[in-house]
Image (cartoon, rainbow, N blue to C red):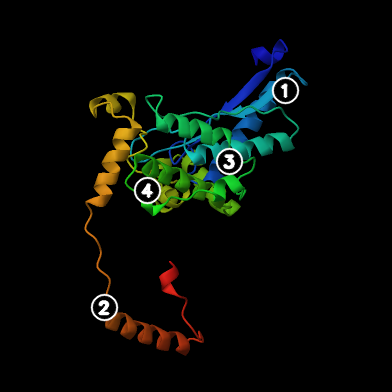
Amino acid sequence: MDCAAHGIPAETVSMPLTGATSPVTLAGALVQHTAESLSGIVIHQTVNPGAPVVYGGAPSVFDMRKGTTPLAAVESSMIVMAYAQIGKSLGLPVHGYLALSDAKLPDYQAGSRARWARRSPPSPGSTSSRARACSTSRAARASRRSSSTAEVCRMARRLIQGVNPRPARETVDVLRQVIGQGSSSFITSDHTRRHFREEVYYPSSVVDRGSYGDWEKSGKKTATDRAHARVEELLARPKLSMASAGLIERLEKIMTADAKRHGVATLPDWRVF
């Protein structure tokens, strides 16, 4: 309000944290961010109509495992990209936080996260060539690079899924339940428990999202250290044995017969999955 009175540009900084201080869905967090930002602009313009204002924020997903706010998560960037579109549609200058990292050292995690955020496509759901080009060769599975690249590929897959549209009623109901009535909290609501796994991608131990203190207690491991450990963990897992050819044939006959009874002539080739 003081900035508005003196004509100093001010930024509204809404910071919804999915599942902690806002609905767990990205769409729900965007609804809350928009409402909070517009309320700040109304106050600002009421003091001094026409005073310069910036549409901004610092939203983040909430890591349910660590209790942290990873601003470098792909979903955090997706919320920023989405609210930037909303701000631009309102004709306002927009500010957002990108190219951040949760890494504790200038290692692979720090570089990959910062580079990823800078190269993110301008709109959620965009199937850009950068997002679709990620692949990991089986021949290189024992290298630390392939283990880390696997995480980047999963981030790319989450990005191209985009912000999942939700029924407006769903977001309104959870906001009324938590904020309007104060009967519960976002983190303990049924809505959060139902949706947090499908909305947010949780990386493996290769990506460190813990606090600095936890990182120190764990031995100050680099991304390379964690990637090597992850590869050894995967290689140590028992190999699954395939069913015998005869058993597979009998199962296919049973499923084919059942499918035909429901009007499905042929089964999809399960070998491609």
Query: For the point 51% across and 46% down, which residue is it?
Result: 156
Amino acid type of the residue that numbered disc 2 sits on in the rendered structure: Ser
Tell me the mark number nearer the camera, choosing from 2 and 3: 2
Q: Which of marks 2 and 4 is nearer the N terminus?
A: 4
Residue 172 seen in the current view: no
Mark-to-mark CA distance, 2 and 1: 73 Å
Q: Position of residue 146 (x, y in %)?
A: 39, 44
First-in-chain label (2 vs 3) = 3
**Quadrant of residue 184 in the image?**
top left
Query: Label 1 belongs to which residue?
Result: 45
For the residues labelled 2 and 4, the Cα–Cα distance comes to: 29 Å
Q: What element carries label 1?
A: helix
Badge 4 or badge 1: first in the primary sequence: 1
Q: Which of 178/56 is in front?
A: 56
In the displayed image of the protein, which residue is found farthest to the front? Answer: 139
Asked whether 107 or 86 is in front, the reply is: 107
**Residue beneath label 3, please?**
30
Please tell me whether mark 2 or mark 4 is closer to you in this view.
4
Viewer-side residue, 248 vs 183: 248
Could you tell whether 202 is left or right of 26 in the image?
left
Disc with the residue nearer the chain's start (4 vs 3):
3
Question: Spatial distance from mark 4 to mark 1, Cα to Cα?
Answer: 58 Å
State the image quarter where residue 188 is shown. top left
Q: Residue at x 50, y 40 (%)?
A: 74
Near-viewer residue (4 or 220): 220
Quadrant in the picture for the N terminus = top right
**In the figure, 267 relative to 96: above or below?**
below
